[in-house]
Amino acid sequence: MAILDVPEELKSLSSTMESIEAVLDLDRMRADIASLEEQAAAPSLWDDPESAQKITSRLSYLQGELRKVEALRSRIDDVGVLFELAEAENDADTRAEAEAELDAVRKAVDEMEVRTLLSGEYDAREALVNIRAEAGGVDAADFAEQLQRMYLRWAERHGYPTEVLETSYAEEAGIKSTTFAVKSPYAYGTLSVEQGTHRLVRISPFDNQGRRQTSFAGVEVLPVVEQSDHVEIDESELRVDVYRSSGPGGQGVNTTDSAVRITHLPTGIVVSCQNERSQIQNRASAMNVLQAKLLERRRQEEQAKMDALKGDGGNSWGNQMRSYVLHPYQMVKDLRTEHEVGNPQAVLDGEIDGFLEAGIRWRKQQEK
C-alpha cells in the first residue's frame, strides 16, 4: 500500500479548488446573490408569480452553490489541521479519521470539478427527460419504468424538484413512454450524457419458462426552452388531439378529455401532456415540450454540419450506451466510458453519479 503524502495531497486539492473557484467566479456569484436578494426583498415581488419563482429559485441555487464551495474550502483546511493533530499526539484513531475525511473531501472536490466542465450552450438549463420502451416487449416496458424511477430517485437524492408531464402505460406492465422535467440548474448538462439506448439483460419475470431476455429503452434529454430561444411554430402546422388521460386507476385527472397530444406536421414530432386537470394547461405544457424538441433538433442539425466540416463521420456517442446485466452475473457498464459497478440494484435505485461524472469527463475529452 502506497504511503500517503498528505502535504502533496492537500496542495493538489487546494490547487483544484482554486481552479474551481476561478471558473465559478465567486465574486460574480456574490454580486448576483446581492442583486437577487434585493429583488426578492421588493414589496412587489409576487405581483408577477412566475418572475418571483425564477428569482427565488435562482437565489436559493446560488446561495447553495456558494455555501458548498466555501464549506469545501474550509474542509480542506480542517483536514490538514486534523493530520497535524494526529501527528502531534501520535494518535492512530485520529489519523484514521483524518484519512477518511481526506477521502471524502477528495471525492467532493472531484464532483464539484465536474460541474465546471458543464460549459455548453444549454448546460445550465433545467432538463426534460423522455424515456420510451424499445425492443423487448413487456420487458422493455418494465425496463422503461425502472429507468424513470431511477432518474426520479436520483433527483430526489439531490433535492431536485421533478414534474411528470406525461406517462403512457403499457397494457401488461410498465410504460410505453414518459416525459418528466428535472427542475434544477445544470440538470440538462448533467443528464444529457444519459441520452441513448439502455440495454437490460435478465431472467424475465414475465416469461413462465424463466428464460433470459434482452430488452431496450431509449432516453432523450432536452434543455428546457427559455423565451430567448425564439423557436418559431406555425399554428397551421400543428394537429392537436384531446383525449382522456390514462393511468393505473382512479385519478380525478382521468374523468375528462383533458389530455392533449400535439403533432408537428413538418417534422412528425409528437408530444403529449396529461398531468394537469385543465386542457389549456396541458396544451401549454405540451407546447413547451415541442419547443424543446424543435430546439434540440436545430442544435443537432447545427452539430451535424460542424461534424461534417470536422470530418467526424457521424460517429455519435448517442446510440447504445449502457448495459444493465442482472443475469448470469451482476454488472452495470457504460459502453463509452468503461465505467462499471457490480451492484445493478443500487444503480436502479438512483445511484448514478459515478456514471454521470464519467460521462461528462468523457464528453469533454471528445470535444478536444
Image (cartoon, helix red, strand yellow):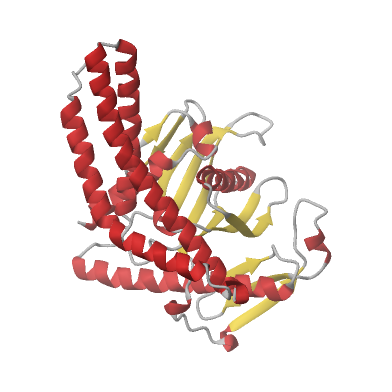
Residue 242 horizontal/vertical position (percent): 73, 74
Residue drawn at (30%, 11%) of the image: 92
Q: Quadrant of the C terminus?
A: bottom left
Q: Is residue 109 visible?
A: no
Depth check, front residue: 166 or 71: 71
Residue drawn at (34%, 41%) of the image: 72
Q: Is residue 160 visible?
A: yes
Residue 340 figure quarter: top left
Residue 221 horizontal/vertical position (percent): 47, 59
Image vertical order of residue 79 relative to residue 285, above or below: above
Image vertical order of residue 158 relative to residue 203, above or below: below
Depth check, front residue: 73 or 23: 73
Residue 43 figure quarter: bottom right
Residue 264 horizontal/vertical position (percent): 56, 78
On screen, residue 210 versus residue 346, left or right, reads right
Residue 93 horizontal/vertical position (percent): 34, 13
Q: How many marks?
A: 0
Depth check, front residue: 366 or 263: 366
Residue drawn at (38%, 65%) of the image: 32
Q: Quadrant of the N terminus?
A: top left
Residue drawn at (53%, 32%) of the image: 345
On screen, residue 176 versus residue 56, left or right, reads right
Depth check, front residue: 165 or 366: 165
